[in-house]
Image: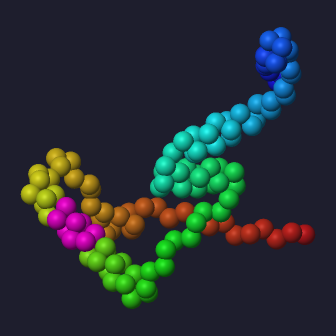
Amino acid sequence: MKVKLKKKSAKNEEENEEMYVRLGDVPLDILRYNISMQSGIERKETRKSLLLKMGAKKPKNPYINYKELMQNKAKAKAEAEAFAFDRSASFVNKKLPLKQAKKKRKNQQKDRPRKKVSKPRKHR
């Protein structure tokens, strides 16, 4: 894409100068400008997001001691179980549905006619 820029020279004459701009670079330049206008932590975060868009690897998770990690997982599991128990207790008091599922009979299999099994034919 061509962009024509008008510059005034020292003699106050206008000169036309052509500058080639790649359209793919325009969003990148805008992002870089936005990053330069931000401050501190915001700048670091936007740089990280820009690098991730460009194909960089994600940063590693911070180190956590193994014992602390196991304790945190145990707490989270206990909270999830407590939540599930509280939730199931609230469903106990609700009315049963009008149509209940039919129970299978024990003799149901005996009532069915058996399929005849044909013997395999011998080839001559």
Dominant secondary structure (helix, strand or loop) of the stretch shown in magenta: helix
- Say left or right for 26 vs 38: right
In this view, which residue lies farthest toward the left? Answer: 93
Q: In which quarter of the image is the N terminus?
A: top right
Q: Nearer the viewer, residue 32 or 53?
A: 32
Any part of residue 111 in sight: yes
Residue, x 68% and y 40% (percent of image)? 28
Residue, x 49% and y 74% (percent of image)? 62
Q: Give the range drawn in magenta.
A: 79-87
Q: Check if residue 84 falls in the magenta segment.
A: yes
In this view, which residue lies farthest toward the bottom? Answer: 67
Q: Which of 27 and 79 is in front in this view?
A: 27
Q: Check if residue 73 falls in the magenta segment.
A: no
Residue, x 62% and y 39% (percent of image)? 33
Above or below, comparing residue 40 to residue 29 in the picture: below
Above or below, comparing residue 72 to residue 13 in the picture: below
Q: Which colour scheme is used?
A: rainbow
Residue 55 lies, in percent from the top left, at 70, 55
Quarter holding residue 5? top right
Residue 77 lies, in percent from the top left, at 31, 75
Residue 78 lies, in percent from the top left, at 26, 76
